[in-house]
Image (tube, rainbow, N blue to C red):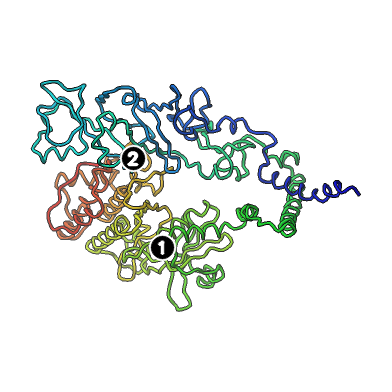
Amino acid sequence: MDPQKLINFRSFPYVMIIFLITLAMAPGTMSADSHFEACMPRSCGNGPDISYPFWIFKEQESFCGYPNFEITCKEKDPILKISEETYIIRDIFYNNNSLLVVNSVVHEDHCPTPWKNVSLDRTPFSLSPDNVNLSILYYCEGQPTYHTYPVSCASNTSFHSFAVFHKEALENTNYSIESCQTLIESPVYVNDGVSFVSLLRMNYTDVLKLGFVLNWIAHSCSNCKRSGGRCGFGNTDEFVCFCSDGPHPKTCNDGNCIGHTPFFLFISGGGSNLNRKLLIGIVSAASGLLISGIILVCFRRNISCITTAKFLRKFTNKDQDLEAFLRNNGTLTPKRYSYSEVKKMTGSFKEELGRGGYGSVYKGKLPDNHLVAVKVLNTSKGNGQEFINEVASISRTSHVNIVTLLGFCLEGGKRALIYEFMSNGSLEKFIYGMTSGDDGRVLTVEELYRIAIGIARGLEYLHLGCNTRILHFDIKPHNILLDHEFHPKISDFGLAKLCHGTDSVVSMIEARGTIGYIAPEVFCRNIGSVSHKSDVYSYGMMILEMAGGRKNLDVGVHETSEIYFPHWIHQNLEQGNIEPELLGLLNEEETEIARKMIIVGLWCIQTNPKDRPIISKVKEMLESKEALQIPPKP
């Protein structure tokens, strides 16, 4: 036999294996989708690559990005228009949804004079907290002795215009800012590569040319990219993952094309039962041949198969991936239990304590007779994100007002969390209409007041006491558990977000929380940035309910104008009508405690996050013996 033919014959199985791998990993490459091709990253010539959520006008279709993220190319510079102002994009940081921009006026003018502050109202953009403010003061009487950046084109012999980074420092030199006609705050981003000395040597225009950083809100593209797709915006105003075989709702691996027939269904002739059975048989046989071939190649050729192993592990080891995340991103101290151990400790899930969208909670007992609450997560929802959030967040905590995580189960898609058992359940059953617990116990206003302070201490610890700041995003009575002495503990960290270092402002793709407790900026970004103040809002709504003994959406009054409890109670507070009878209390002493909780709650739910106190101040106000000022109507 011809040696060349022998080589070709022996190579045939490997060729078939490569073909099957290619077919399995890219079934749609037979016919590339036009959306996929159109949304390839582009560039204007200068600056960064332009891709989702941005798109280039006249070069790409609008479905490649979000509305208001349209970019035009002007002399090879990418230009973004926001609120009638045009900005040149210097860099885009897709990893944290931010971009560095310079006002086009600054770029083109040797002595730029911005006459108004940066306006981002009703836009998907917000100023990054990493910026610092450069105060530009126009037409001032007298020239300060403190270091400033002169604005020569807006100065004359009678008036001086200048810029300064810390306008507060001028007041320490007895300079009167009121002598200036106009004050503009211009954001500037000073990166680590610009030293303080070099900053002092710059002129006014060079400082403004440093630009500033904007954050944006859009659906995350990371999962789509990892699956080999390109992100876009569909006809139904929803996120779409464009893949080589057509648009998918989330990732190229979800197997659910929008308006396209997947390749395997196409060759099987549609979706009849016979064809589906035939398809299952073909795929099963091909999968067996593929895996056998890969193993054969690995052993015979003595190759590492690292890439192949990763490919297979993607579909078989999701629980190992979750474990790796937990090991790398948190201090995984809780004990791991098998699913059979979870079944045994709960008596095959005999006694259910509660149920929610996440799954169910069951009463259990460890081998040492220690009572526990076992939270079994619903595996049909999400991709393990809630499990990751809960364990990665709570494993970093240790506080008397934070529930303790004792263990977890992660086995073949089954996920459970084992917590210390809280004998009095959730706060929810004790506060509405001053109802009682299972044993008939009714909490007094003073006990509710102590519980409110305990919750504030727990939140203060999450926001300030941990090495990593934790934002809870679901503070509500249902998630406050009470031990046998009615000490409160914050639970349910499934929606939590971690903030590294001193960060407090976070970017969010979608609103998270519970209706009635969600801060307005979480679902309406024009109000302000999502931050630790969002937890303060939820806390405020909760203690208003605790003080009034009723839900904020049902106050039991007859006038429709009085249905919203915070407005109703604020009106009565202003008019001095907070009497024991109004809140169904017994005496003036209880009413005074409730009055303090109401005032603090109203401060916490101010619409603008900047008007709300931080949680440490909230705790201080609750513990204070001095009279508190009534806040504006929220």
Label 1 residue SS: loop
Q: Is residue 581 above or below residue 57?
A: below
Q: Which residue is mark 1?
A: 395
Q: Which residue is mark 2?
A: 128
Q: Nearer the viewer, residue 25 or 520?
A: 25
Q: Farthest bottom residue?
A: 368
Residue type at numbered disc 1: Ser
The spot of residue 543 in percent (x, y) is 27, 54
Quarter of the figure with residue 161: top left
For the C terminus, give its image quadrant: top left
**Residue at 50% in and 34% down:** 51
The spot of residue 474 in percent (x, y) is 37, 52
How packed mark 1 is, by other alpha carbons closer than 10 Å (few <14, some 14-19, many 20 or more), is many
Q: Nearer the viewer, residue 372 or 499?
A: 499
Query: Nearer the observer, disc 2 or disc 1?
Result: 2
From where the camera sits, is residue 520 visible?
no
Label 2 residue SS: loop
Q: Nearer the viewer, residue 503 or 387?
A: 503
Disc with the residue nearer the chain's start (2 vs 1): 2
From where the camera sits, is residue 207 visible?
yes
Q: Is residue 4 above or below residue 175?
A: below
Quarter of the figure with residue 438: bottom left
Q: CA distance from mark 2 to mark 1?
A: 29 Å
How packed mark 2 is, by other alpha carbons closer than 10 Å (few <14, some 14-19, many 20 or more), is many
The spot of residue 124 in percent (x, y) is 39, 34
Residue type at numbered disc 2: Ser
